[in-house]
């Protein structure tokens, strides 16, 4: 049986039909397909639940970013995807808002980083996040614990950031993998399973800042090893 990977689109849309979802994620899908070397499917979060994941049985799951504050989502709208995430013990990685959704699925609190001081980056006046600090641009992130996700990388990596909210405490059963001064939980993993969250954007990289690409390639190596019944440590 040919296995595919799954991208879950959690960016709220007024019209989340199939064509709109594919079009909105075209660039990311192409990138993930290239790095994984295998086909990616995409689905909107309201159509993902445990039965959907069970039928598709993807080789890995990538949860994308959110884009707007969590208070604009409904509990009912997130119920199915959060239940699916909680029950998943195969390779999964949440990116930025996907990292936050993973934490919320396991009962952890997500909130704004803090209020912005004068001169610090924030949203434009009238924007959703105006007045709150934004961690943005290429930032140093410190590896707290060795993990296959960071194989071949230095203890300090430079990755792209772009968020106003953060995971405030580790979910039960997770361990801290990376941090920095602005956001303490930059990366985490469910102990004993290849289930990861990263607050930064590993899918944004260039020749001068290649560490994000390495993180994603490592994740897809983890997925391959998992399905070859090779344990990860």
Image: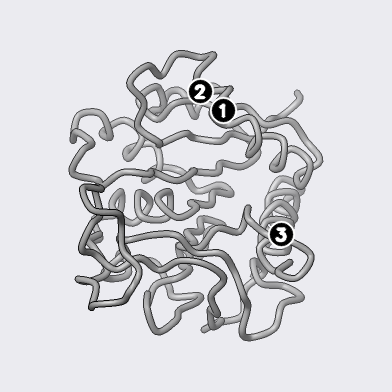
1 and 2 marks in contact (CB < 8 Å) = yes
Instruction: Locate the N terminus by quadrant.
Output: top right
| Residue labelled with disc 2 | 21
Between the C-alphas of marks 1 and 2, the distance is 8 Å
Looking at this view, is 125 or 36 the one in front? 125
Q: Residue at x 37, y 78 (%)?
A: 182
Q: Residue at x 38, y 43 (%)?
A: 66
Where is residue 95? Give x, y as percent: 50, 53
Q: Secondary structure at mark 3?
A: helix
Residue 50 versus residue 171 in the image, above or below: above
Looking at this view, is 153 or 200 the one in front? 200
Q: Secondary structure at mark 1?
A: strand
Q: Residue at x 35, y 25 (%)?
A: 46
Between the C-alphas of marks 2 and 3, the distance is 24 Å
Between the C-alphas of marks 1 and 3, the distance is 20 Å
Q: Dot 1: within a 10 Å radius of its alpha carbon, few (fewer than 14), some, or many (20 or more) residues?
A: some
What is the quadrant of residue 154 in the picture?
Answer: bottom right
Instruction: Locate the C terminus by quadrant.
Output: bottom right
Residue 225 versus residue 215 in the image, above or below: above
Residue 136 versus residue 98 in the image, above or below: below
The answer to which of marks 1 and 3 sits earlier in the sequence is 1
Res 42 label: 1
| Closer to viewer: mark 1 or mark 2 | 2
1 and 3 marks in contact (CB < 8 Å) = no
| Residue labelled with disc 3 | 213
Q: Dot 2: within a 10 Å radius of its alpha carbon, few (fewer than 14), some, or many (20 or more) residues?
A: some
The answer to which of marks 2 and 3 sits earlier in the sequence is 2
What is the quadrant of residue 208 in the picture?
Answer: bottom right
| Closer to viewer: mark 1 or mark 3 | 3
Q: Residue at x 31, y 30 (%)?
A: 80
């Amino acid at each position: 049986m040919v296995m595919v990977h799954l991208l879950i689109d959690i960016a709220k849309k007024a019209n989340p039909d199939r064509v709109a979802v594919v079009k909105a994620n075209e660039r990311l899908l192409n990138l993930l397909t290239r790095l994984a070397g295998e086909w990616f499917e995409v689905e909107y979060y309201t159509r993902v639940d445990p039965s959907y994941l069970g039928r598709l049985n993807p080789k890995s799951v990538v949860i994308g970013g959110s884009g707007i504050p969590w208070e604009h989502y409904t509990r009912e709208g997130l119920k199915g995807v959060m239940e699916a995430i909680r029950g998943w013990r195969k390779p999964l990685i949440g990116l930025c808002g996907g990292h936050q959704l993973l934490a919320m699925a396991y009962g952890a609190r997500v909130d704004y980083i803090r209020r912005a001081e004068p001169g610090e980056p924030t949203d434009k006046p009238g924007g959703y996040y105006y007045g709150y600090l934004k961690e943005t641009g290429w930032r140093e992130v410190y590896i707290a614990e060795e993990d296959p996700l960071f194989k071949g990388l230095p203890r300090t990596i430079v990755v792209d950031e772009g968020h106003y909210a953060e995971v405030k405490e580790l979910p039960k059963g997770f361990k801290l993998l990376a941090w920095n001064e602005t956001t303490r939980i930059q990366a985490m993993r469910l102990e004993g399973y290849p289930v990861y969250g990263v607050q930064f954007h590993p899918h944004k990289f260039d020749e001068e800042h290649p560490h994000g690409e390495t993180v994603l390639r490592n994740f897809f190596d983890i997925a391959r090893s998992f399905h070859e019944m090779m344990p990860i440590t």
